[in-house]
Image (spheres, rainbow, N blue to C red):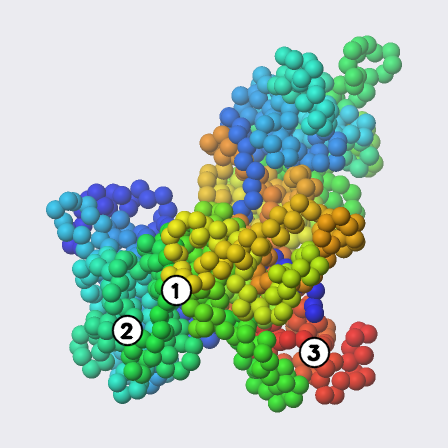
């Protein structure tokens, strides 16, 4: 194993906004050079696109102000949410959606809310391969305005399967009328984008009892859709849908005490395709053989942050629904957590979990399947700890006993689908709690394995690696403003995925120290060469160098 | 949308942040944000020359000394918001500098006022927290704030209206001098002369007086005074002149080598060397200019650069009368300093504008900006001792709202926008390794996807 190294990520670039933004104010887009750029909105109706351009072998940040047509002047309206997708081939072009509310200056004036949809209108001569239809400046010029009868919340997009089997991207907009509205492009109709009844595609969007603040969709297997809905009243709902038959297969729900602020599906292991140049190298192929461990790390987990409680990871939601969870310790200590992300920030192929808080802190958690603990030598009731069943172990990180305790004592059933297990968990928790007390009582001496032998008057203890999956804080970084959004994307075209942090007053593009990363790559290349088929004298020669 | 109310438009005019202009490239420079700061309260107007970072109490840890035009002087140490020491009723403080003015091998605090009063303080290191608390308790009412007040160890009246000051060994004789510039376009150089045994300076810990060694009359208003080394490696005294020019002041002790010391001849011999630089190209010939010299070019490199900045937003880097590059910004640059922000041994030029835009520029003209979102009364770059971290590079801003901000976590890995491909390119073994692994190094796309997989998809073979 490589020694665990924490990379210090710093600002590669900071782009200041003209006024503050919100949690729906960032959208990732593709550039012509196949890197990523970001479109950011601020409340005062201004939009910025942030990307990197290559000049020679140097990269420099490029910030453009985008003037979208039919957006009221600053002060008249506030931008709520933005989203964008690219049409699927054979059609092409970028489609951007922006929602805003007109501010009520006079009482008499009715409050209006608008969804504007932008896409390029090109004449036949212009319709070449120049990629004009993806240029934001051109897209921003042609607008289709839809007035809304509800206050808009999150605007996002996904693909739906049409009757003829084709896929088609649609906009999803959550509204204050407790509905999620679906907007589909009508290529043949002059109306452009039209609202279609949501039950046509989304049986899971029926019977919503509250405002949907967060909406996350993933496709675990073909023809299935996993939808997570986070509500203002703290409800979280998870649905598994068969997209061909358009029917719900399974659903789960749970209840928290505060609004759901972010939802993210992720797998423990980062899935990276092998580059073509390495495909035929035999040893590399063997690395990807699916061991059991790998299979476990490819299970879909759901990360959720709420306004007041610690962030929670629901593990392997396809199997366990919302019943298996771990909490991220102390993630509620920095004001409300508003955004979250799963990204690999220490280059070990595993996703770390990032939580951005209103308290201006970015918290990064790393997953550990086991914990080193002082346990009494083989008391019978602890035997299950020693059998390797990490996935079925209901407990617990350092903080989660507390969580479970709240769960029991509040009398409120947080995890409805978890009814039978509640009592069991309580028992489990007490056991763990007693262990923890023991640990805190022992304090620093925990570090000395010899210590257990001194305690002959009580049960003997020994340091053991017990399978106890938990998350631990890996890295923490402060920002000058509250955090509103998190994303990661390769912006510079150099192989490193930059961390993108949206705060109320700007967009931070972050990167680790390049020399440290270069050293890491060099070490790994040396190891690859060493383990390669024709490793030999040349490798040693290189090592000497 | 048609009936846009007048209220709304007036609101938009009074917005704190200007709206971005029509679709246009806003800027290409890298920006960063700094977070970790120490916030201090200090009432009164501060001018840039009256704020300095240095080890004033000779304990190896740097402090911040700041004086205002109402005569209050405060020394801040560590992250405490209360001054470690303070003095008041000194006059209109215009210059505060730290140096071994008495030539006894330790730092003193020298404070000049516009009235011409020179106060020199001998600051004793503060007792450790516990013992000072013990003192407070034992002495009862005499403890606390009283013990924080310091009084000058030496006071002398000098010519009035000083604007900038430098305490350094200006002529290379091993003794520290004090160079002071005045608003009547005069520069004077003073040296401490210890009193002989027969003279009676009874009671003073450091008997003696400041004695004027040199006096230069210049043509234009002097923006700043600095030092650099000349072609032979000898120290030179430089002052900036309007229109982005500067003047080398030839000092008496160095002039004496070549000219006879008779007074009549000496007045004829040139005492100034004017460097016009790109003066003919400067649009405003009277624009206020500041200068900083002795910018380190790297470890083990003896020669140095100097830089000039003017209020019209131009920054130039100069080596031996030659402009290496110039940089134009649309902000009013009024303070120039140098600091090794990247920790690579090269000192970056740091320049601050009235509205808080701070530019960090390296020797190859790469810029990184930080926007301190307030108007700046005074700015300093240097080292400050933060508890647990020792002396770290920092920026200090004094605002017009009676606040001082010390940003102490400002280290950057590099000034330019770094990406992985050029960094890997520079490593000697990269090409060989890529070749061995069958990656075509001439195709950036291929290399990029290979690096991406190496970072995120690679697993050590079992």
Quadrant including the N terminus of chain A = bottom right
- Image height check: is A234 above or below A285? above
Q: CA distance from mark 2 to mark 1?
A: 22 Å
Q: Residue furthest right?
A: B197
Q: Residue at x 34, y 79 (%)?
A: A242
Between A501 and B374, which is closer to the camera in this rendering?
A: A501
* Res. A175 visible in picture: no
Kindly indicate whether the residue at mark 3 contacts the one at mark 1 (C-beta within 8 angstroms).
no
Quarter of the figure with residue B155: top right
Kindly indicate whether the residue at mark 1 contacts the one at mark 2 (C-beta within 8 angstroms).
no
Please provide percent x and percent y for residue A272: 54, 77
**For discs 2 and 1, the disc positioned in front in the rendered view:** 1
Please provide percent x and percent y for residue B56: 70, 30
Q: Determine whether the residue tagged by mark 2 lies in a helix, strand or loop.
A: loop
Between A363 and A63, which is closer to the camera in this rendering?
A: A363
Q: Read off the chain for label 3.
A: B
Q: Are marks 1 and 3 on the same chain?
A: no
Residue holding disc 3: B462
Residue holding disc 2: A202
Residue holding disc 1: A417
Quarter of the figure with residue B247: top right
B309 lies left or right of B124 = left
Quadrant including the C terminus of chain A = bottom right
Q: Alpha-carbon neighbours of circle 1 within 10 Å: few (<14), some, or many (≥20)?
A: some
């Amino acid at each position: 194993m490589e020694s665990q190294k924490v990379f210090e990520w710093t600002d590669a670039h900071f782009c200041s906004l003209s006024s503050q933004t919100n949690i729906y104010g960032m959208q990732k887009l593709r550039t012509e050079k196949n890197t990523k750029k970001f479109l950011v909105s601020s409340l005062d109706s201004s939009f910025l696109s942030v990307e990197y351009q290559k000049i020679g072998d140097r990269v420099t940040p490029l910030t453009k102000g985008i003037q979208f047509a039919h957006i009221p002047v600053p002060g008249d309206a506030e931008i709520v949410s933005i989203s964008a997708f690219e049409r699927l081939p054979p059609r092409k072009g970028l489609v951007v959606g922006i929602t805003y509310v007109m501010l009520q200056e006079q009482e008499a004036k009715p409050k209006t809310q608008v969804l504007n949809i932008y896409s390029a209108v090109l004449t036949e001569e212009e319709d070449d391969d120049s990629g004009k239809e993806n240029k934001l400046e051109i897209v921003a010029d042609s607008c289709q305005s839809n007035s809304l009868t509800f206050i808009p919340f999150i605007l996002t997009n996904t693909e739906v399967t049409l009757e003829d089997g084709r896929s088609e991207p649609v906009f999803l907009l959550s509204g204050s009328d407790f509905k999620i509205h679906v907007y589909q492009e009508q290529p043949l109709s002059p109306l452009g984008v039209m609202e279609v009844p949501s039950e046509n595609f989304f049986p899971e969007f029926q019977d919503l009892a509250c405002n949907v603040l967060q909406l996350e969709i993933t496709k675990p297997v073909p023809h299935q859709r996993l939808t997570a809905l986070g509500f203002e009243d703290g409800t979280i709902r998870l649905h598994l849908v068969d997209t061909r038959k358009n029917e719900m297969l399974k659903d789960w729900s749970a209840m928290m005490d505060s609004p759901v602020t972010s939802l993210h599906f992720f797998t423990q292991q980062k899935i990276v395709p092998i580059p073509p140049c390495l495909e035929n190298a035999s040893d590399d192929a063997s690395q990807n053989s699916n061991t059991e461990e790998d299979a476990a790390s490819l299970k879909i987990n759901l990360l959720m942050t709420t306004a007041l409680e610690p962030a929670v990871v629901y593990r392997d939601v396809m199997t366990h629904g919302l019943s298996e969870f771990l909490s991220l310790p102390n993630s509620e200590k920095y004001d409300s957590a508003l955004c979250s992300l799963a990204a690999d920030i220490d280059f070990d192929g595993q996703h770390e979990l990032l939580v951005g808080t209103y308290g201006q802190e970015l918290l990064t958690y790393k997953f550990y399947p086991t914990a080193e603990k002082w346990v009494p030598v083989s008391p019978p009731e602890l035997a299950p700890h020693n059998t390797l069943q990490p996935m079925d172990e209901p407990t617990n990180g350092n903080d989660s006993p507390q969580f479970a305790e709240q769960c029991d004592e509040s009398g409120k059933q947080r995890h409805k689908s978890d009814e039978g297990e509640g009592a069991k968990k309580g028992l489990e928790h007490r056991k763990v709690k007693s262990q923890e007390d023991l640990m805190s009582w022992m304090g620093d001496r925990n570090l000395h394995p010899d210590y257990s032998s001194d305690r002959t008057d009580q049960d003997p203890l020994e340091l053991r690696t017990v399978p106890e999956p938990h998350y631990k804080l890996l890295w923490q970084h402060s920002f000058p403003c509250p955090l509103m959004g998190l994303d990661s994307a390769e912006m510079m075209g150099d192989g490193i995925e930059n961390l993108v942090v949206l705060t109320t007053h700007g967009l931070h593009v972050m990167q680790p120290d390049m020399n440290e990363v270069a050293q890491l790559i060099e070490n790994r290349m040396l190891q690859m060469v060493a383990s390669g088929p024709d490793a030999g004298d040349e490798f040693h020669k290189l090592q000497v160098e | 949308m048609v009936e846009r109310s007048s209220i709304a438009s007036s609101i938009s005019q009074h917005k704190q942040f200007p709206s971005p202009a029509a679709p246009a490239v806003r800027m290409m420079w890298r920006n960063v944000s700094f977070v970790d700061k120490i916030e201090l309260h200090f009432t009164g107007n501060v001018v840039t020359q009256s704020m300095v970072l240095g080890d004033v109490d000779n304990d190896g840890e740097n402090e911040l000394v700041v004086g205002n035009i109402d005569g209050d002087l405060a020394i801040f140490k560590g992250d405490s918001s209360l001054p470690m020491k303070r003095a008041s009723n000194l006059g209109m403080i215009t210059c505060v500098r730290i140096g071994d003015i008495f030539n006894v091998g330790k730092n003193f605090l020298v404070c000049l006022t516009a009235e011409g009063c020179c106060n020199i303080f001998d600051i004793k290191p503060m007792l450790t927290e516990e013992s000072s608390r013990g003192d407070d308790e034992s002495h009862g009412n005499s403890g606390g704030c009283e013990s924080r007040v310091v009084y000058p160890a030496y006071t002398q009246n000098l010519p009035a209206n000083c604007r900038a000051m430098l305490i350094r060994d200006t002529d290379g004789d091993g003794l520290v001098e004090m160079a002071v510039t005045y608003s009547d376009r005069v520069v004077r150089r003073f040296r401490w002369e210890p009193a002989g045994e027969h003279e009676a300076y009874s009671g003073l810990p450091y008997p003696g007086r400041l004695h004027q060694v040199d006096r230069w009359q210049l043509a234009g208003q002097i923006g700043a005074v600095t030092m650099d080394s000349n072609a032979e490696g000898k120290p030179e005294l430089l002052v900036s002149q309007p229109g982005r020019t500067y003047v080398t002041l030839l000092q008496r002790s160095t002039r004496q080598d070549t000219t006879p010391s008779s007074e009549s001849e000496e007045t004829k011999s040139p005492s100034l060397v004017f460097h016009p630089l790109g003066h003919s190209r400067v649009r405003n010939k009277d624009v206020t200019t500041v200068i900083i010299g002795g910018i380190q070019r790297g470890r083990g490199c003896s020669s140095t650069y100097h830089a000039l900045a003017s209020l019209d937003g131009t920054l130039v880097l100069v080596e031996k009368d030659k402009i290496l590059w110039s940089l134009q910004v649309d902000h009013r640059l009024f303070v120039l300093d140098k600091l090794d922000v990247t920790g690579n041994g090269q000192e970056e030029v740091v320049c601050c504008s009235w509205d808080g835009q701070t530019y960090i520029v390296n020797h190859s003209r790469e810029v990184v900006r930080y926007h301190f979102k307030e108007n700046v009364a005074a700015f300093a770059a240097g080292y400050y001792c933060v508890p647990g971290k020792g002396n770290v590079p920092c920026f200090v801003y004094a605002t017009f709202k009676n606040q001082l901000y010390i940003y102490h976590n400002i280290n950057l890995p590099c000034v330019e926008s770094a990406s992985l491909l050029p960094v890997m390119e520079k490593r000697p073994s990269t090409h060989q390794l890529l070749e061995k692994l069958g990656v075509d190094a001439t195709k950036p796309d291929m290399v990029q996807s290979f690096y991406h997989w190496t970072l995120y998809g690679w697993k050590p073979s079992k």
